[in-house]
Each structure stands twice: as C-alpha cells, then as structure tokens.
Amino acid sequence: MTDDTTYDDLRHLLVAAAHAHHAVYGGPSDTWARWYAEWMYGQLLPLLTSDPSVDTVEGWLTVADERYRSEEPEGSWPGHYAGWIIAWDTET
C-alpha cells in the first residue's frame, strides 16, 4: 500500500466515522474521540504499520483535534488528521 493510498483510505475512514457519529448522536459529543476510535479500529489497523490500542487511537484523535483547532491550517480536518495519524503511527 502506498503512502498516498494509506492517506486517502484513512481520510475516507475519518469521514465515514464522522457521518456515522453524526447519525448516532446528531452532533458533537464529549466522547467523540473514543467513539471514533472504537468505530474505526478494525478498518484502521490494516492501514497502519504499528499495532496501536484503541486508547492510543483515541489519544491520536484527541491530539489531532487540539492541534487542528489551535493551528487552524488550510484545508479540511480529515486530511490533516490522516496525515498526523500516519506520522504518529510511523513514530510508534
């Protein structure tokens, strides 16, 4: 799997998680990062080089959200989260 493919697949997985979360909760929730981590977990592992726990994935999502909000980068959040998760995965 190429880096571009991993990035695209992860970005699409994040979007799918967001849609599913919205369908269940109808909007934001305080436990969104845990919910996303659990919902994505089985589909996420084949995209990664490490074997993170659900807790680790939840932590990555929480930090990605904090980083995105503080840095306010150009572009949509799924792309940034995907890039950061790939970087953190390779550091693990």
Image (tube, rainbow, N blue to C red):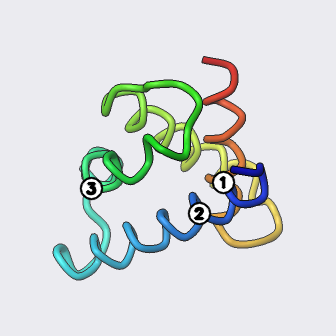
Residue under numbered circle 3: 39
Image spot of residue 27 (x, y percent)? 29, 76
What type is the residue that disc 3 sits on? Trp
Image spot of residue 69 (x, y percent)? 63, 54
Q: Badge 1, how many Cα within 10 Å: few under 14, some, many 20+?
A: some
Q: Who's the residue at 54% across and 37% down the image?
A: 63
What type is the residue that disc 1 sits on? Thr
Tag 2 or tag 3, which sits nearer the N-term?
A: 2
Q: Badge 2, how many Cα within 10 Å: few under 14, some, many 20+?
A: some
What type is the residue that disc 2 sits on? Asp
Image spot of residue 87 (x, y percent)? 72, 34
Extreme residue in the left direction:
24
Q: Where, by quadrant of the figure, is residue 66 drawn?
A: top right
Residue under numbered circle 1: 6
- Secondary structure category for the residue under label 3: helix
Q: Who's the residue at 44% across and 25% down the image?
A: 51
Q: Who's the residue at 54% across and 50% down the image?
A: 65
